[in-house]
């Protein structure tokens, strides 16, 4: 696969897997220097960890990007009781394995894209995080002020999740494929995002990422929907590290944030909010430099 000029994606430099204490396997992808500052990347809905971003910037800033497959997605084992807390514990085990911690949790950065934002917030509570970036992040739909802003279709979907969770999960497992999910993403994307997503190299990598993500079936994705659409055990108000929220005003997705993260940004104690007028939901790739530079700056300030 060729490296794209504007969006700067390339295959992972390294892949690895770890046998966890409960005999599950967690798998992940890496880009950037192996001795670089660790950045945990929580990917979007249904994605494996194989679609990276900003490789040249990772090298320049000496950042080691680590993108796990969440349990039940990609090449990571299913976890029947998967939760935000259990995923955070899995990532802590990865850091131990990579010898990034001794007796204490190491300093690391965290980034969550789309649905991955919810998991990234959980990591920011569990790990020793110098900075959290939320990029086109899924909001907390159960938060009253946010819930009032939801489109009716999404509101109904969340109501179904809350009232009949097992039926909701079974419908997802029976009906959702990687092809369906890619079609949904493209159909709900703005022109600026389609400019990114429809480029042949990017589309091929995205299609492969979703195909890997749902290669075990849709159960892992269904679990993620149940987790992120429900009540969160960690609230934004509890996150003490610097948080950078990045949203594009041209993001047409109904499952990110109804007010482009404005309400969510006010809930973090130490937040910087960036709403970019000419960007959409794909700004993780078009603005990778700025996003990574902010995280690197917060990491450097924490290390002083």
Image (tube, grey):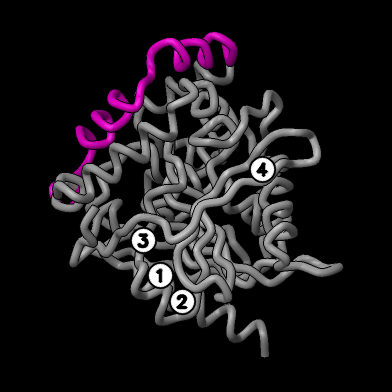
Is residue 187 inside the magenta stretch? yes
Which numbered disc, 2 or 4, marks the residue that appears first in the sequence? 4
Q: Which residue is tagged 1?
A: 291
In depth, the one of 193 and 40 nearer the eye is 40
Quadrant in which the C terminus is drawn: bottom right
Q: Are marks 2 and 1 in contact (CB under 8 Å)?
A: yes
**C-alpha distance separating marks 4 and 1:** 24 Å
Range of the magenta residues?
164-193
Q: Which residue is tagged 2?
A: 294
Left or right, 183 with respect to 79, comes to: left
Q: Secondary structure at mark 1?
A: helix
Count neighbours of disc 3 (C-alpha within 10 A) and say few if under 14, some if 14 to 19, many if 20 or more: many
Q: Which residue is tagged 4?
A: 87
Left or right, 86 with respect to 173, comes to: right
Tell me the residue at 43%/28% (across/down): 214
**C-alpha distance separating marks 2 and 4:** 25 Å
In depth, the one of 272 and 186 nearer the eye is 186
Q: Are marks 1 and 3 in contact (CB under 8 Å)?
A: no
Residue 10, x across and y down, in percent: 31, 59
């Amino acid at each position: 696969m060729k490296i794209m000029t504007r969006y700067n994606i390339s295959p992972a430099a390294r892949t690895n897997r770890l046998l966890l204490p409960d005999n599950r396997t967690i798998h992940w992808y890496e880009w950037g220097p192996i001795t670089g500052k660790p950045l945990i990347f929580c990917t979007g809905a249904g994605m494996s960890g194989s679609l990276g971003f900003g490789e040249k910037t990772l090298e320049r800033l000496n950042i080691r990007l680590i993108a796990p497959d969440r349990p039940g997605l990609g090449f990571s084992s299913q976890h029947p009781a998967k939760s935000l807390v259990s995923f955070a514990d899995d990532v802590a085990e990865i850091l131990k394995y990579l010898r990034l911690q001794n007796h204490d949790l190491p300093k690391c950065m965290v980034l969550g894209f789309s649905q991955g934002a919810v998991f990234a917030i959980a990591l920011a509570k569990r790990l020793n995080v110098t900075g959290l970036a939320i990029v086109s992040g899924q909001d907390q739909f159960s938060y009253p002020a946010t819930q009032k802003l939801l489109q009716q279709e999404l509101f109904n979907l969340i109501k179904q999740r809350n009232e009949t969770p097992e039926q909701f999960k079974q419908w997802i497992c029976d009906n959702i494929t990687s092809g369906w999910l890619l079609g949904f993403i493209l159909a709900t994307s703005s022109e600026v995002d389609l400019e990114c997503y429809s480029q042949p190299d990017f589309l091929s990598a995205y299609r492969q990422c979703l195909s890997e993500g749902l290669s075990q079936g849709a159960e892992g994705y269904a679990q993620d929907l149940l987790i992120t659409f429900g009540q969160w055990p960690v609230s934004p108000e509890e996150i003490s590290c610097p948080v950078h929220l990045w949203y594009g005003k041209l993001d047409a997705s109904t499952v990110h944030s109804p007010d482009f993260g404005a309400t969510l940004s006010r809930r973090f104690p130490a937040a910087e909010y960036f709403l970019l007028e000419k960007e959409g939901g794909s700004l993780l790739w078009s603005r990778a430099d700025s996003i990574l530079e902010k995280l690197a700056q917060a990491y450097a300030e924490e290390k002083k």
